[in-house]
Amino acid sequence: MKKVLHIRRQKAGSNDAYWEDFIYEYKEADTVATALMTLPVVWEHSCLQKRCGACAVVINGIPRLACDTRLSSLKGQRVVIEPLRKFPVVEDLLVDRSSMMDKLREMELWLNDDAVPDGEKMAFEASKCLQCGLCLEVCPNFYVGGKFGGMAAMAPTARLLNKAPEDQQPELSKIYDQNIYEGCAKSLACRNICPAQIDIENLLVKSAAASIWKIFRKKRKI
Amino acid sequence: MTNNTRISVNVIGAGLAGLSAAKELAERGVYVRLFSVQASERAQSNLAEGGINACLDVMGENDTWIEHYEDTMKGGCYLADPDMVKNLTENAPEVVMEMDRLGVPFHRADGHIIQRNFGGQKKKRTTYAMSSTGKVLVVALIDAVRKYEHSGYVKRYPHHRFEKIIIKNSECVGVQIYDIYTHTRSVFEGPVIIACGGFNGMFPGLTTGTTANTGLAAAELFSQGIEFANLEFIQYHPTTTEITGKRLLISEAARGEGGRLFYIRADGSYCYFMEDKYGERGNLMPRDVISREMAMLGHQVYLNLMELTEDTWTNKLSDLRDEIMHYMSIDPKIQPVPVSPGIHYFMGGIKVDIGHHTNLTGLYAAGECACAYHGANRLGGNSLLGAIYGGQTAARSILADMADSLKNDYALSDGDITDYKYMSDADKKISSVIEHELANGLGIIRNGKSLQRAIDNINNSINNYIQSLDIAGEQQLSDELINRYRFAIAMLTSALERRESRGAHTREDYPDTLEEYRRTSVIKWSGKMFIQE
């Protein structure tokens, strides 16, 4: 069984991009990552079991993890592989996603004091976020440098909203409102794209409840 | 520049050990440069599943840290430094409680932390979050370190690769770093903590680890004269399976929650071989014991998870079930899971003392790259603990040393940058031969002949390669290949020289454990290989 991997390549961000085809003979279990491992193409990879988010690329127009995409599941012989489009290309499929981490720093996301022994379920759900950037790729409201941090910023905020002590809640609520709530038009385009299968809808509802309507805080006070 | 707070400490690696060291230093007002090839979210620490050990005594079993100490020493076949293990286990509850204060969502019931059974331990002392404990710990530490990034105490250098340490007057005074994005080199002065993880890259495709972990840093340090210890001890985890490009781990938590190992007899009946031989806790024997039993069986082994309760699947192992279903197309609730041993952890590594100092002043090591707490075999749940505690300890040692012995008055400049040659395509072919021989020599069951054969084959390959290139000596080969060659020979030599069987090191030709070998094997490169007998 053969696939033709049609890959968008670029020597550096400032160079012109070009397309190159590679013929890859694949086995049933092979993923796009398996194929990329054999090619002289620059890309980011680490765990190969969708636990790290390194290998996020666009495959046949859909943002996905290369290690989570079996070649046998893709229709047709040609597989089009491109870098994520919302981040600057460093080389070939490697993009610079440091703006995601910059955003979290800018939002000042950390605990000021000891966490509360509560909210484990939602904090666990939020902790699953891989910071891969796939959700940002499909989000109609997110752009690098904008105020809205997208779901990749929502998940870390939600973790803190569930674990932060009482007196940090107002500050976190404000951060949530300004960087997430106000920018999200609830398209939920990110819902089915998350490789960690985070229950985004539930996390959004619960986080909004905590930050906008202060439901968690009132409950805790009781 | 003694006691100068403007000194920055260079931390190599941003997984749990590196994050832990960075946090500890920044909290005490020391500036940190945190170098990593990829972001912390991609580090191998994220893959750790089952949990983190500490005697919290929350399960009504009258647990004490002394029992944690004894289990760890026994599991490691009494090879680890007792004082180091004592420190680790006595401080483990504080490590876990600190992680709890950072908001790690440990499994709770009625607000109280719950612990689970894990291999080689008599009591329930493994704190966990489903089978994603490493991930939730990393996330919490990323958040904690972010605070210091914001205040300027921690400066991150993602996409930066360690190339070498800089040594002047027998002191490590800085590091040479390669920026993967810009393809430029820089040097940074200050003491160095190596937290680069294990040596998976020496066994590509055969480990449960990450591809980002190339082994390059460790191999370079070995070539630079840093002493390594116990390199022969490689943990084969009994329950892994091959997926494309690597081994997938089936967490020990699956057995901690009641999973049972068996093979199918000729008549179709199940033989629970571990229980038959070791009794009801047979499935939770230390990993070296189970892997050895499996290697000697000659049957396909399966993991029976079909008797686990609905509550266990829903609240304790749902992520593990998802992973097995996704990668193996097997539903472990209704089907047995075929498993076989795979390389999972390196007990050996950079030789460190109780304060995580290496043999070179100004250089420290923590986490899997350091040989510290696990002796001849690591217990499940002790790696996350060792990484966090090791990072903290190395950081505290630097703090003490900065006020005392560390001179660190060297200002480095671009003139200190030296070349570092990476492998060519031809070099990579020779490296593949080395990797193949290494894996052959260092299987679960070893013997002197096969170890010597692996060494000879590697030496022949390198020598033939040098001749074929028609060059004068190995100095003209790439640094990366030379380092990988030396490091591979060091691992094989360590295994050859330990003429006994202990923990993860099983010798067919020396099946007994010998008191005279109850010692750390130390190996060093200094123009030639030196092994400390």
Image: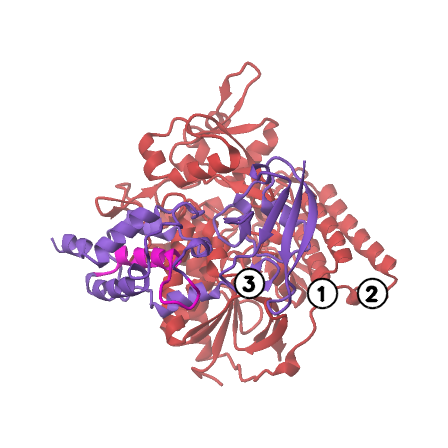
In the image, residue A121 sits, relative to residue B399, either above or below, namely above
Please tell me whether mark 2 sits on a helix, a strand or a loop. Answer: loop
Q: Position of residue B427 (x, y in %)?
A: 76, 57
Q: Give the residue at mark 3.
A: B37
Q: Is residue B19 left or right of residue B59?
A: right
| Badge 1 or badge 2: first in the primary sequence | 2
Q: Are marks 1 and 2 on the same chain?
A: yes
Q: Chain of mark 3?
A: B
Mark 1–mark 2 Cα distance, whole angstroms, equals: 13 Å
Of residue B462 and residue A89, the one placed in the foreground of this image is A89
Using the rendered image, report if marks 3 and 1 lie on a common chain: yes
The residue stretch that appears in magenta: A143-165
Helix, strand or loop for disc 1: helix
Three-letter code, disc 2? Gly
Residue at mark 2: B473
Which residue lies under the disc numbered 1? B479
Q: Which shade is chain B?
A: red
Question: Residue at the top extreme?
Answer: B267
